[in-house]
């Protein structure tokens, strides 16, 4: 048997009832959070996160002196 708990929303402090014993977002704030996440996902969908070269290829192509990468400070 599930028990109903009364909480205040952690964002807007609106009171809501839920079966979860821990407070979270109310239904309105949760929908707004999901809509924002969808917008961010749409903006990030066109971007590639993959490197063109692996770390090993970058190391191999870096200038070296005596077998160590030459770093200018």
Image (cartoon, rainbow, N blue to C red):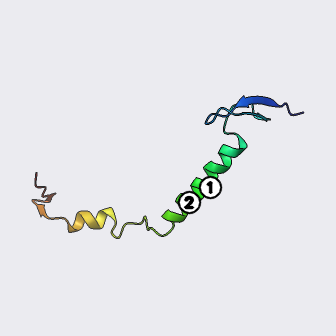
Q: For the point 24% across and 62% down, which residue is it?
A: 59
Badge 2 marks a residue whose secondary structure is: helix
The quarter of the picture where residue 20 lies is top right
Which labelled disc corresponds to residue 54? none
The number of callouts visible is 2
Q: For the point 73% across and 29% down, which residue is it?
A: 7
Mark 1: give few (<14), some (14-19) or many (20+) Cα within 10 Å.
Answer: few
Residue located farthest toward the right when viewing the structure as drawn = 1
Q: Which residue is mark 1?
A: 35
Q: For the point 72% across and 44% down, which residue is it?
A: 27
Q: For the point 69% across and 45% down, which residue is it?
A: 28
> Where 53 falls versus 40 (above or below)?
below
The quarter of the picture where residue 18 lies is top right
Q: Position of residue 65 (x, y in %)?
A: 9, 60
Q: Position of residue 68 (x, y in %)?
A: 15, 57
Q: Is residue 41 left or right of 30 when viewed as pictured? A: left
Q: Position of residue 31 (x, y in %)?
A: 67, 50
> Where 39 falls versus 8 (above or below)?
below
The front one of 18 and 35 is: 35
Badge 1 marks a residue whose secondary structure is: helix
Mark 2: give few (<14), some (14-19) or many (20+) Cα within 10 Å.
Answer: few
Which labelled disc corresponds to residue 39? 2
The quarter of the picture where residue 1 lies is top right
Q: Position of residue 69 (x, y in %)?
A: 16, 58
Whole-number angstrom distance, CA of label 2 to CA of label 1: 6 Å
Q: Is residue 65 left or right of 11 when viewed as pictured? A: left
Residue contact between numbered discs 2 and 1, judged by CB atoms under 8 Å: yes
Q: Is residue 69 left or right of 16 when viewed as pictured? A: left
């Amino acid at each position: 048997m599930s028990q109903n708990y009364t909480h205040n929303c952690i964002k807007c402090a609106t009171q809501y009832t839920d079966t979860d014993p821990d407070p979270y977002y109310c239904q309105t704030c949760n929908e707004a959070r999901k809509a924002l996440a969808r917008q961010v996902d749409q903006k990030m969908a066109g971007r590639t996160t993959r490197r063109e070269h692996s770390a090993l290829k970058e190391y191999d192509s870096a200038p070296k002196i005596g077998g160590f990468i030459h770093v200018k400070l």
